[in-house]
Amino acid sequence: MTVAPAEGGASAPATDAAAALLAGLVSRGVRHLVVSPGSRSQALALVAAELERTGLVRLHVRIDERVAGFTALGIGRETGMPAAVICTSGTAVANLLPAALEAHHSGVPLLLLTGDRPPELRGVGANQTTRQPGLFHSATRFEADLSVPETVDPDATDPQTAAFDAVAATALAAALGEGARPAGPVHLNVPLREPLAGAVPAWLTDRATRRAPSGDVGDVEASGALYQGGGGIGVADVAPEPEAALVLEPGPRTIVVAGADAGAAAEELAHRGGFPLVAEIVSGARFGRHVVHAYRALLRDPGLGGRVERVVVFGHPTLSREITRLLSREDVEVIAVRGPGEPINLNGATRAADAVDADGPGDRAWLGEWMRASRAAAVDLSPPAPDADGLASAVPQERLGAINAEVAVIRAPVDRAALVDALWRATWPHDRLVFGSSRLVRVADELLGGKKVAVHANRGLAGIDGTIATATGVALASQDAERPGVTRVLLGDLAFLHDVGALLLPPGEHEPRLQVIVGNDGGGTIFDGLEVAGVAGADAMERVQYTPQDVRLEQLALAYGWEYHRVTTRVALDQALTSPAGGRQLIEVPLER
């Protein structure tokens, strides 16, 4: 079927194809669309707006594609279902690469829908045109350079509509990791010819609300939905069928290590097997009776860490060199439980398992040694309780001493330890906590005790990219359907400034309950504790590593419409964190270098 250029309410092949693709995703469970505006992607964007108008999706508009990508990443982290990012051609696509790489290494589902010029305009100097197919090839679970839509479909019976629906099914299944590698990013490149948009087809809502099987895989190649002249299709190798749980035989002195995104399964194994649990603060497993406090020092202890014979690893450990050294030892058996991210094999002899179970309780004496050392190393960071007797005393000196002690507590400045402790104490299971890749996450990992709260962090590549945007996505998803809770993100000043564009939210969009807590020490003090500090001269260290900054965060908060608080005492910090949060709050905590 041929069609004339779209004018006014006329149909256009680009819009019909966009409707088929997005309806296919929505009918299979996708509920969040993130759009960065642009010309070549306008058909996809306008269909997304119509899906929002009918209440079928939550639409989030971001002018910066990097922010859009990490917002979608946060949604995928929280829900386990990918959000679809829509953008135009050229550098817009390249800005999605950081989020795609993080999603790949962390095993987070993500859908990238990129508008493009048709094949005849590639490589000939056309405006905003580069080689987009294959741009994410090393990271994607599935990629396809779609055929250029040529027909309109007034009654949703055209083969083109079926082809784009099949692409949606295959893409979603690949993003979720169904029948392939773990969950991760998928790239659908959507080349379009003019007219770039027309009337949204009347069948959109019906197709988007049909109860399509979640994750059903369409016959993409047979459908003719791919443009085979360039880019083609890439599909991950199919993984073997899940194995039965590996049952640990008794004997070797064992600990459980929980890295980023390990989840509750690590705590469950430690509890069933009677093993010490070394859980990073970003693991989501730092709770339960077997959690080891101050694990770094205990791993360095020859009588404890030096005697470990077997380690079961969940998630992706990244926060301490002590764990890395342990997992690299040739005399330690390492069993890595397959998770969403990359497999761990630092000593070259790691066994992988889909699941691990314990054959009865382990070595009680071994566990007892760890628990006694853990209790001795635990630190209580809470402010001292008021001296009730002194405050009520009729003896002036006793009463004055108690009052002075209370004033000292109230006026005590906030250091890094107090900051992470206050944040941990203010957060509860209905809240969400996001850690940026800053010095503060290591302080939290070293000092904080056990507590069952939902924790997120982009530790796949441990970059400072997109921290605020990721937290925004987590907040939007976790607070859907009016669910309670506050999302708090803790990061340093450089990580904050790196993603400051994520503070911008369009007027009229739902405002999440989000607290961004910035530990501001004026630069990258994390480098003070790395090897470079002992190698670089003072001037070079200051110039290219510490990278000092003196940005006025209050002015940024005001410009972007955020509520701002600057706190310097523990009492003020506790009040700021626990006061009713009706929207977006920026809390700045000045810290000494």
Image (cartoon, rainbow, N blue to C red):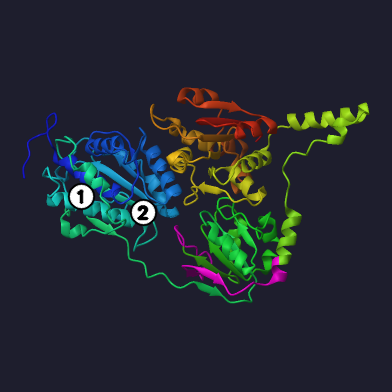
Q: Residues within 10 Å of mark 1 (few under 14, many from 20)?
A: many
Is residue 266 shown to the viewer in this render? yes
Q: Is residue 22 left or right of residue 263?
A: left
User: Where is mark 2, residue-wise?
Assistant: 139
- Residue 87 position, x and y percent, is 29, 39
In which quadrant of the rendered image does the C terminus lie? top right
Alpha-carbon distance for marks 1 and 2? 19 Å
Q: Which quadrant of the structure image shows residue 304?
A: bottom right
Looking at the image, residue 125 lies above or below residue 109: above
Mark sitting on residue 298:
none
Mark sitting on residue 146:
1
Q: Is residue 439 left or right of residue 37?
A: right
Label 1: which secondary element? loop
Viewer-proximal residue, 444 or 488?
488
In which quadrant of the rendered image does the N terminus lie? top left
Looking at the image, residue 501 lies above or below residue 144: above
Q: Is residue 191 left or right of residue 559?
A: left
- Residue 411 position, x and y percent, is 74, 29
Please name the amino acid that badge 2 sits on: Ala
Viewer-proximal residue, 104 or 180?
180
